[in-house]
Image (cartoon, rainbow, N blue to C red):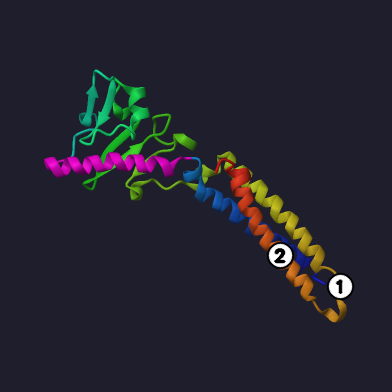
């Protein structure tokens, strides 16, 4: 039978490990699932490609993004760059006609590399969810900070769900392992059941992540 001290150590380690795994996975998924990095970066890439094309044709990068805008007065539409792109900036441009593109998208030359940053729905530096800043090329994307993640509801949900799951499974395992067995032997059935518990726990981690923390995955 497991000693009381060993039970406490096991419970603490298991709860810490499982809760930590869920919180870290939720933290790593936040920019993609909530910040919209997965759909915003491809759009920023199209802008970036236009800047590269402009440099290839003229020898220099444009001074600003506004200089690459063109207007179709008859149709009342706005296009961007030599390719006449409409989709990457459609929403932004339609909201901003007459106020300039730089309100939401920042263009910088960093070490002679054009870096495009979408400032999010709020149009200012920083922010959470779709107010997050997203940059292209990806290596210029500012790392998402864990201290910022701790301010989100996703952190709270992942922490409490992880704590609940780890606690429930720990109680089940301890109850099973604490039973006396003949001649001090630990039966194969108990070992197999423990493995099943752990596998089920791993399955529930995925359910928690994309069912409770990020339900719209």
Mark 2 to mark 1 CA distance (whole Å): 21 Å
Quadrant housing the C terminus? top right
User: Mark on residue 36?
Assistant: none
Q: Could you say where residue 149 lies in the image, as x and y percent from the top left?
A: 52, 44
Q: Is residue 125 above or below residue 146?
A: above
Q: In the image as oriented, which residue stretches furthest toward the front? A: 75
Q: Residues within 10 Å of mark 1 (few under 14, many from 20)?
A: few
Q: Nearer the viewer, residue 168 or 42?
A: 42
Residue drawn at 22 percent across, 34 percent down: 81
Q: Nearer the viewer, residue 161 or 50?
A: 50
Whether residue 52 is visible to the viewer of this picture, yes or no, is yes
Q: In the image as oriented, which residue stretches furthest toward the top? A: 74
Quarter holding residue 100: top left
Element carrying mark 1: loop
User: Mark on residue 196?
Assistant: 2
Q: Which segment did they paint magenta?
A: 35-60
């Amino acid at each position: 039978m497991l000693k009381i001290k060993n039970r406490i150590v096991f419970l603490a380690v298991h709860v810490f490990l499982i809760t930590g795994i869920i919180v870290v996975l939720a933290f790593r998924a936040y920019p993609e699932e909530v910040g919209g990095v997965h759909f915003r970066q491809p759009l920023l890439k199209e802008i970036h490609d236009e800047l590269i094309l402009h440099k290839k044709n003229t020898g220099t990068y444009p001074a600003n993004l506004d200089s690459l805008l063109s207007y179709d007065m008859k149709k009342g539409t706005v296009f961007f760059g030599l390719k006449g792109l409409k989709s990457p900036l459609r929403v932004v441009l339609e909201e901003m006609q007459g106020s300039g593109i730089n309100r939401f998208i920042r263009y910088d030359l960093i070490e002679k590399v054009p870096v495009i940053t979408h400032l999010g729905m709020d149009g200012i530096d920083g922010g959470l969810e779709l107010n997050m800043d997203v940059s292209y090329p990806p290596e210029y994307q500012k790392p998402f900070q864990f201290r910022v993640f701790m301010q989100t509801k996703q952190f709270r949900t992942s922490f409490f769900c992880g704590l609940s799951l780890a606690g429930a499974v720990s109680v089940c395992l301890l109850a099973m392992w604490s039973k006396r067995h003949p001649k001090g032997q630990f039966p194969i059935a108990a070992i197999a059941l423990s493995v099943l518990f752990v596998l089920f726990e791993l399955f529930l981690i995925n359910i928690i992540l994309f069912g409770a923390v990020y339900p719209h995955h």
